[in-house]
């Protein structure tokens, strides 16, 4: 189980599942093509991140600082920090939503989760429980079975995958942007690169790493596909077109699990949220250290790496605290943070593109002209989504 | 790696002096400390002629690496109109934190071409990785400080603090002033700027040469690509070879790919033959041949033979380094041979052969020292007789022999009974070390 698969399954976190559910519930099969494009983008940029990490043995933020200077370095670090903070908030929102399905107050579940995650990671016992979280989040593979049992309209699904159409309105652009943002999450890109650097992976490991990255990314796409299809065949068909709480989202699993649908959904949410909530602050703290030129990791004690531990602690504390604010709409937070992801993705993608074609840095691994066109197309697509969303927000 | 706490500059200087064993760190001089100019702040500032008229804006500063511990500024790259021009360093009259004055009114503008042994401070060094020799770590430079020294303007220090880095984000004068926080003396860092293969003889080389091979190996493993090759190029080949021996095989193969065949051949010839054979064995056939061809023919032949042996047989783990003496040689001759080979490896004795080259005995140094210098070696023959294994003995047999004879080494002989190498206890340890971890979650990384 490598970093690509971890990143992939963590991508199907509460924010991912909620966003995909929203896509299926609101628009049926129509927007499946957005997921397909997002998955292709995920594969390509994760692959690029792995390559940059192995070849340069430097983290993304450090490289941006080296190539583009102090201001760009800081800009990319801040973008990553904010995006990751948003996503971490979404993980805690997922924990809160799952707790509510069982009737537990978020004032108990969220602080508990924040404490458990910090304790496990800082004690260094994360590697042991990682597999447990992993297994829990794998519950979402149930959507594949649920998808078949819900007897979807495969013809329409195929049409949705192949023919890119969408209603040109705020809601459609909004959810399409969120889909891009949750699938191609900024943290995953930085994570895969710093993983390769931290583990000192060599060019000989690159093949294995790429297999891992492709597997993880495809897994994200496949689960996402079945979440959308399941929700289209159940919620959307039944006229339940707007999901406002986790219980409604869990309804999609009723054809499969019957009365156990809620429990199944909650277990998946908790597993994926804990998995992502463990890695997110860690990866962010690493990137902040990367900006200073001294990437720190758990090997260094708090005295040697104050910034690392401060970032880790503060992020977890604030993200959990935000979810405890009275009256915060969990489902909206879950999707909104993914919009934030998409916006903050832009500078990072741009910098990665620039690094990829730098022969001095990448040598024989520099991107070819054809790949640069593909990267450019993806960046343009994200930009168009963000600009269109901005336009619709200003002119409702 | 541990991160030393940020100290006030005077303390840093003291520490640096202690570590390098020099009292003359220029940062300790008050006149230098008061005249430090921030390079990061200087970029973009106006360059004026003698009359004070602006000629253009500073794009980069060129320095020349050479004999000096503190490289002097050899020129400026200035944007004049739409064009980037080079101005010779000799023309600089004054250089302050917000402008550069030249010493004449008419300036000869030429295009800049990279020359050997020069690097551009902004595009090659600032924000790039440098090796902090005393702290044994790879850091990024947040700022570089220039100061007049020995009639020239030179780079004297590197600031590696985060506070200084953050200062540069601010616009205007705020971002330009020098804020020496955690400054390292330039002579105690190794800049990895690519100077097109010029071997630098500046301070960094001497500082690097004081490192232990194992520490150097760690530093090398922290880097990759261009920077990694640059560091290797900077090292004395003997020291580099020692450091390479400490590295993981997989890591070492990656490194060899980034070096020229000649350099790779040079380094591998200085390593223990069994260690170089092990690395060469796993290289791509073509690459291996290129390196072997660049080597001394005799050594290449020896290595080819070692490479052909299976790693699970005695021949695959032995070293071919040993001192062979004939039974009719004298004790003095044997000792002389040991002394002559001391640079290559430290032998614990000589392997004695008869006139046909067959193994007779292994004589310990202590026996040689105790014997009369003029005595013939044959007088020292006697128990304990050396343990010998055949070149194709399996690893299990080697271990068996080792545990029976409890010695520090055993001799390997070929089918004719001639000694061809020795297996030392540490070679056996290497052979028995559990296979290197495969897969992506190997190593000591602690990201998760």
Image (spheres, coloured by chain):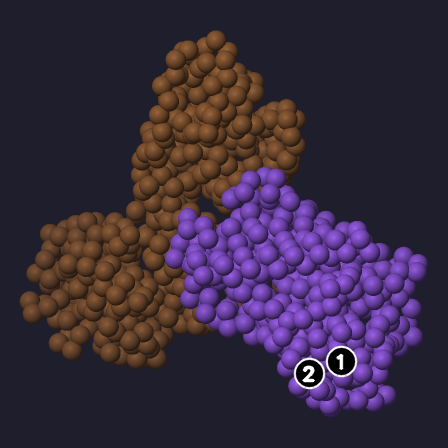
Chain colours: A purple, B brown
The residue wearing badge 2 is A156
Q: Chain of mark 1?
A: A
Which quadrant of the structure image shows residue A112? bottom right
Q: Position of residue B249 (x, y in %)?
A: 38, 63
Mark 1 residue crowding within 10 angstroms, few (<14) / some (14–19) / many (20+): many
Q: Would residue A346 be found to the left or right of residue A67 on screen?
A: right
Instruction: Write the residue at 43% across / 58% down.
Output: A369
Observer-side mark, 1 or 2, equals: 2
The residue wearing badge 1 is A232
Q: Position of residue B415 (x, y in %)?
A: 16, 78
Could you say which is closer to the camera, residue A83 or residue B272? A83
Q: Is residue A131 above or below residue A353?
A: below
Mark 2 residue crowding within 10 angstroms, few (<14) / some (14–19) / many (20+): some
Q: Residue furthest top?
A: B51
Which quadrant of the structure image shows residue B181? top right
Instruction: Write the residue at 12% across / 71% down.
Output: B358
Mark nearer the N terminus (1 vs 2): 2
User: Does the rendering let one see residue A282?
Assistant: no
Assign a secondary structure to mark 1: helix
Assign a secondary structure to mark 2: helix
Which quadrant of the structure image shows residue B161? top right
Could you say which is closer to the camera, residue B367 or residue B394? B394
Q: Chain of mark 2?
A: A
Q: Is residue A95 above or below residue A146?
A: above
Q: Position of residue B445 (x, y in %)?
A: 56, 60
Instruction: Write the residue at 23% across / 75% down.
Output: B391
Quadrant where the image shows the C terminus of chain B: bottom right
Q: Would residue A42 be found to the left or right of residue B247 on screen?
A: right
Q: Are marks 1 and 2 on the same chain?
A: yes
């Amino acid at each position: 189980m490598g970093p690509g698969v971890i990143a992939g399954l963590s991508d199907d976190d509460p924010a991912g599942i909620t966003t995909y559910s929203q896509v299926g519930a609101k628009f049926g099969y129509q927007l499946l093509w957005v997921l397909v494009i997002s998955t292709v983008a995920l594969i390509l940029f994760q692959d690029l991140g792995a390559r940059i990490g192995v070849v340069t043995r430097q983290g993304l933020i450090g490289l941006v600082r080296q190539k583009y200077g102090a201001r760009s370095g800081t800009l990319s670090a801040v973008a990553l920090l904010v995006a990751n903070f948003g996503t971490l908030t979404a993980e805690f929102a997922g924990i809160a939503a799952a707790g509510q399905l069982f009737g537990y107050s978020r004032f108990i579940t969220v602080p508990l989760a924040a404490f458990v995650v910090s304790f496990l990671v800082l004690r260094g016992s994360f590697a042991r429980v990682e597999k447990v979280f992993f297994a829990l989040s794998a519950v979402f593979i149930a959507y594949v079975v649920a998808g078949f049992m819900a007897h979807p309209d495969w013809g329409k699904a195929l049409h949705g995958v192949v023919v890119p159409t969408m209603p040109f309105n705020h809601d459609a652009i909004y959810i399409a942007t969120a889909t891009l943002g949750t699938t191609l999450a900024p943290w995953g890109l930085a994570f895969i690169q710093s993983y390769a650097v931290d583990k000192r992976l060599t060019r000989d490991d690159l093949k294995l790493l790429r297999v891992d990255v492709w597997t993880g990314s495809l897994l994200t796409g496949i689960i996402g596909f079945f979440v959308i299809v399941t929700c289209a065949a159940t919620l959307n068909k039944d006229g339940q077109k707007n999901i406002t709480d986790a219980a409604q989202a869990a309804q999609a699993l009723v054809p499969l699990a019957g009365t156990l649908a809620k429990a199944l959904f909650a277990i998946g949410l908790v597993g994926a949220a804990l998995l992502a909530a463990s890695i997110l602050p860690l990866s962010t703290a690493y990137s902040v250290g990367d900006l200073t030129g001294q990437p720190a990791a758990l090997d260094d004690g708090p005295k040697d790496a104050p910034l690392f531990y401060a970032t880790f602690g503060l992020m977890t504390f604030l993200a959990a605290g935000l979810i405890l604010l009275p009256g915060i709409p969990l489902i909206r937070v879950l999707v909104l943070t993914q919009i934030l992801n998409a916006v903050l993705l832009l500078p990072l993608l741009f910098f990665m593109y620039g690094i990829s074609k730098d022969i001095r840095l990448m040598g024989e691994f520099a991107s070819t002209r054809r790949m640069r066109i593909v990267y450019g197309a993806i960046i343009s697509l994200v930009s168009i989504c963000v600009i269109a969303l901005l336009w619709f927000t200003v002119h409702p | 790696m541990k991160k030393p706490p940020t100290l006030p500059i005077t303390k840093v200087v003291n520490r640096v002096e202690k570590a390098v064993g020099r009292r003359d760190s220029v940062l300790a001089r008050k006149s230098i400390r008061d005249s430090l100019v921030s390079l990061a702040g200087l970029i973009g500032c106006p360059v004026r002629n003698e009359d004070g008229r602006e000629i253009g804006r500073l794009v980069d500063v060129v320095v020349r690496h050479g004999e000096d511990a503190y490289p002097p500024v050899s020129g400026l790259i200035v944007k004049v109109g739409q064009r980037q021009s080079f101005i010779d360093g000799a023309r600089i009259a004054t250089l302050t934190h917000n402008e550069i004055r030249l010493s004449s009114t008419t300036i000869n503008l030429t295009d800049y071409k990279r020359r050997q042994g020069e690097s551009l401070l902004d595009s090659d060094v600032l924000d790039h990785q440098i090796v902090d020799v005393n702290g044994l770590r790879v850091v990024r430079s947040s700022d570089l400080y220039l100061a007049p020294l020995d009639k020239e303007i030179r780079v004297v220090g590197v600031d590696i603090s985060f506070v200084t880095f953050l200062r540069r984000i601010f616009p205007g004068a705020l971002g330009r002033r020098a804020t020496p926080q955690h400054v390292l003396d330039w002579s105690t860092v190794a800049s990895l700027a690519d100077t097109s293969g010029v071997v630098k003889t500046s301070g960094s080389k001497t500082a690097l040469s004081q490192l232990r091979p194992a520490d150097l190996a760690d530093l090398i493993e922290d880097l990759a690509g261009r920077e990694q090759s640059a560091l290797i190029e900077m090292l004395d080949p003997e020291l580099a070879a020692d450091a390479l021996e400490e590295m993981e095989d997989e890591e070492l193969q990656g490194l060899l790919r980034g070096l020229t065949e000649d350099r790779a051949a040079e380094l591998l010839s200085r390593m223990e033959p069994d260690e170089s054979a092990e690395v060469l064995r796993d290289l791509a056939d073509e690459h291996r041949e290129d390196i072997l061809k660049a080597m001394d023919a005799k050594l290449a032949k020896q290595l080819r033979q070692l490479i052909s042996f299976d790693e699970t047989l005695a021949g695959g783990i032995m070293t071919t380094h040993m001192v062979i003496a004939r039974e009719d040689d004298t004790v003095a001759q044997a000792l002389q041979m040991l002394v002559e080979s001391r640079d290559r490896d430290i032998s614990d004795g000589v392997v004695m052969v008869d006139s046909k080259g067959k193994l007779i005995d292994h004589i310990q140094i202590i026996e040689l020292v105790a014997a009369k210098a003029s005595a013939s070696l044959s007088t020292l023959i006697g128990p304990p007789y050396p343990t010998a294994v055949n070149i194709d003995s399996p690893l299990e047999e080697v271990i068996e022999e080792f545990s029976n004879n409890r010695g520090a080494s055993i001799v390997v002989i070929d089918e004719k009974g001639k000694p061809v190498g020795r297996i030392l206890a540490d070679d056996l340890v290497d052979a028995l070390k559990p296979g290197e971890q495969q897969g992506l979650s190997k190593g000591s990384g602690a990201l998760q």
